[in-house]
Amino acid sequence: MCDLHDHDHDLEIQDNVEAVLRINGSVARPLELTYEDLLRLPQDLYVEDVGKVIPGVKGEGILLKGILEVAKPEAGTKAVTVRASNSAFTANLSLEELENHGILVYRQNGEPLSPASGGPIRLYIPGDTVGCSNVKSVGLIHIDSPQSHHHDHDHDHDHDHDHPHDHGSHPH
């Protein structure tokens, strides 16, 4: 087991356990988080009722900002690639957008978020206006190098990952 420290945010990451979320790329500390790691995050990162932030979405979430603070993206980084673990779907988003608004929904009714609801982890970006308000089954958040040249909000289009209300695929 290794300990990760960041000011007020301490994480204990289990080695040799299957990760549900990986954060890598241009970061000082790549992370491989298990579901149990998510349950041990500092309380100030939890969103007990995501529906209060995103009407119509049920579940418990984690503010992505705190996890990114531990990973420590390289200075000057602007772009992030979010990849679904069970498909080739990727979304290219701004780091600022994820830090300021990203919520990872991981529980519903006290249980892990089911694959049918976009689990084990589903990313939501409240108020997003560019068409990628959520990504189901997030497995990887890759912090692109400051030199990479993604077009802002350029992403593979997969209607099942966009606008949960339009597709009836939000967690119940």
Image: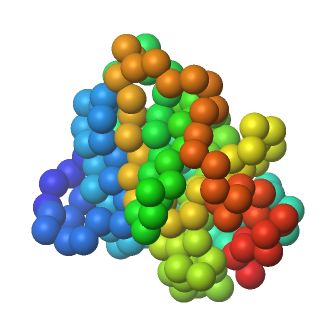
- Up-down: is 69 above or below 57? above
Quadrant including the C terminus:
bottom right
Q: Residue at x 80, y 43 (%)?
A: 127
| Camera-nearest residue between 70 and 6 | 70
Q: Can residue 124 be seen in this view?
A: no
Q: Which residue is drawn at 73% across and 71% down?
A: 170
Q: Position of residue 29 (x, y in %)?
A: 25, 38
| Camera-nearest residue between 47 and 127 | 127
Q: Residue at x 45, y 52 (%)?
A: 83
| Camera-nearest residue between 158 and 95 | 158
Q: Where is residue 60 in the image (x, y as percent from the top left)?
A: 63, 69
Q: Where is residue 158 in the image (x, y as percent from the top left)?
A: 64, 56
Q: Residue at x 46, y 40 (%)?
A: 81
Label tally:
0
| Camera-nearest residue between 114 and 147 | 147
Q: Which colour scheme is used?
A: rainbow
- Up-down: is 143 above or below 41? above
> In the image, is 159 to the left or to the right of 167?
left
Asked which quadrant contains residue 147, the reply is top left
Asked which quadrant contains residue 105, the reply is bottom right
> In the image, is 153 to the left or to the right of 169?
left
Asked which quadrant contains residue 146, the reply is top left
Quadrant including the N terminus:
bottom left
Q: Can residue 142 be seen in this view?
A: yes
- Up-down: is 69 above or below 77? below
Q: Position of residue 155 (x, y in %)?
A: 59, 40
